[in-house]
Image (spheres, helix red, strand yellow):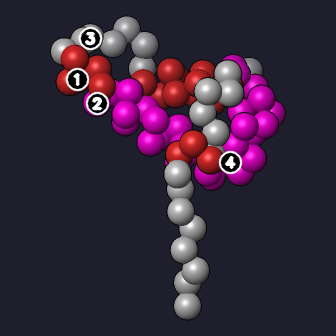
Amino acid sequence: MMLYPAMNKLTANVPNRYLLVNVVARRARQIAQEAEDAGEKMDVKPVTLAIHEVADGKISAAASEIEIKDVE
């Protein structure tokens, strides 16, 4: 089974796989909420759109504004 887009293309924009999942999930929720607010029916799943945005370089880990806090 081939994954499209390829994982190496996705990790070029978000270097950590776990962070990639977080970024894609966050963006997918935004896409779904925007479609719901506009009353639009989506033909393509929000996760698919979010993955393609990452692959195209439209989204990176820095754009998601994820904060890492020190644990003491």
Please, what secondary structure does the residue beneath circle 1 have? helix
Circle 1 residue: 36
Quarter of the figure that contains the C terminus: bottom right
Task: State the residue at coordinates (53%, 56%).
Answer: 66
Question: Which amino acid does the dot numbered 3 rest on?
Answer: Lys
Question: Which amino acid does the dot numbered 4 rest on?
Answer: Arg
Pinpoint residue 43: horizontal percent, then vertical percent. 37, 8
Question: Which amino acid does the dot numbered 2 rest on?
Answer: Gln
Task: State the residue at coordinates (71%, 33%).
Answer: 10
Between the residue at mark 2 and the residue at mark 1, the CA separation in whole angstroms equals 5 Å
Find out whether the residues at labels 1 and 4 contact each other: C-beta distance under 8 Å: no
**The quadrant where residue 30 appears:** top left
Pinpoint residue 1: horizontal percent, then vertical percent. 72, 22
Between the residue at mark 4 and the residue at mark 3, the CA separation in whole angstroms equals 30 Å
Circle 3 residue: 41
Circle 4 residue: 17
Q: Which residues are magenta?
A: 4-33
Mark positioned earlier in the residue sequence (2 or 4): 4
Find out whether the residues at labels 2 and 1 contact each other: C-beta distance under 8 Å: yes
Which dot marks residue 33?
Answer: 2
**The quadrant where residue 35 appears:** top left
**The quadrant where residue 36 appears:** top left
Please, what secondary structure does the residue beneath circle 2 have? helix
Q: Residues within 10 Å of mark 1 (few under 14, many from 20)?
A: few
